[in-house]
Image: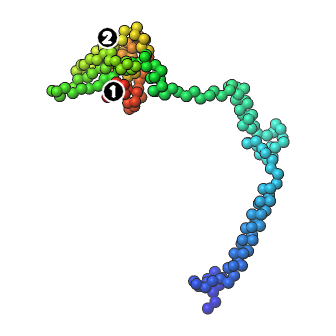
């Protein structure tokens, strides 16, 4: 039974296979050599954005990135260098004498009642400026506590506080009127309040 070239039985090698492979390899080698010789021709260095047909045409060509930069420079001036923002701990070290921190926290009494504690302290010395306790903190109570501990002539410039809802806009207005800049800590980031929080 004679089989065609596409229908060989398993285990019987094709007698013409080596000739076919040689022919394919010769074709691939010749294609590779012609591509290599084409790449050896002298290259014309073109700025990014120029097509082969644009080289040497002058005004008909596309703008280069250098021209884009020059036009932006003429319009907007030199690019500004990136100014790194000051890290939190660097800010604290630089201004420790002028920073106070305020924090509310909850304490459970021996009779299982909750009391709210307001703590105000200096950052540099860790000295407690004010500490008071209440069962029901209100805006008026909080404002009175800040009036008692921050008069305005101590040299404090910043107050660090969290985003607790007890610090209303009235409390912030009172603190600003006392000459303090209110710095709110980011949400769910305890690093800034580690001075006052445990």
Location of the C terminus by quadrant is top left
Residue at the spot x=80%, y=43% of the render?
54
Tags 1 and 2 in contact by the CB under 8 Å rule?
no
As drawn, the residue found furthest toward the left would be 111
* Secondary structure of the residue carrying numbered label 2: helix
Q: Nearer the viewer, residue 99 or 41?
A: 99
**Which of label 1 and label 2 is nearer to you?**
1
Among the 4 quarters of the image, the one containing residue 116: top left
Label tally: 2
Residue 11 position in % (x across, y down): 58, 84
Question: Can the viewer see residue 109 in this picture?
Answer: yes
Residue at the spot x=77%, y=60% of the render?
35
Q: Nearer the viewer, residue 110 or 173?
A: 110
Residue at the spot x=80%, y=59% of the render?
37
Location of the N terminus by quadrant is bottom right
Residue 195 position in % (x across, y down): 36, 25
Answer with mark 1 or mark 2, whichever residue precedes in sequence: 2
* Secondary structure of the residue carrying numbered label 1: loop
Q: Residue 4, labelled with which disc? A: none
How many C-alpha atoms fall within 10 Å of the one at disc 1: few (<14), some, or many (≥20)?
some
As drawn, the residue found furthest toward the bottom would be 1
Q: Residue 148, labelled with which disc? A: 2
Q: Nearer the viewer, residue 55 or 40?
A: 40
Residue 197 position in % (x across, y down): 33, 27
Residue 106 position in % (x across, y down): 26, 26
**Is 9 positioned to the left or the right of 153 in the image?**
right
How many C-alpha atoms fall within 10 Å of the one at disc 2: few (<14), some, or many (≥20)?
few
- Measure the alpha-carbon separation of dots 1 and 2: 21 Å
Q: Residue 197, labelled with which disc? A: 1
Among the 4 quarters of the image, the one containing residue 49: top right
């Amino acid at each position: 039974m004679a089989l065609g070239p596409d229908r060989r039985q398993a285990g019987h090698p094709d007698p013409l296979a080596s000739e076919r492979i040689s022919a394919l390899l010769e074709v691939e080698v010749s294609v590779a050599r012609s591509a290599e010789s084409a790449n050896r021709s002298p290259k014309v260095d073109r700025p990014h954005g120029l097509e082969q047909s644009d080289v040497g045409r002058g005004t008909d060509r596309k703008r280069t990135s250098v021209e884009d930069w020059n036009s932006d420079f003429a319009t907007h001036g030199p690019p500004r260098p990136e100014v790194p923002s000051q890290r939190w701990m660097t800010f604290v070290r630089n201004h420790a004498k002028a920073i106070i921190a305020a924090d509310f926290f909850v304490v459970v009494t021996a009779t299982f009642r909750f009391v709210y504690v307001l703590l105000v302290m200096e950052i540099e010395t860790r000295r407690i400026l004010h500490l008071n306790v209440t069962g029901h903190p209100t805006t008026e109570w909080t404002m009175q506590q800040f009036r008692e501990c921050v008069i305005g002539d101590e040299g404090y410039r910043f107050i660090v506080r969290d985003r607790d809802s007890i610090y209303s806009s009235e409390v912030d207005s009172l603190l600003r009127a006392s000459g303090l800049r209110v710095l709110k800590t980011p949400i769910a980031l305890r690093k800034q309040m580690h001075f006052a929080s445990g």
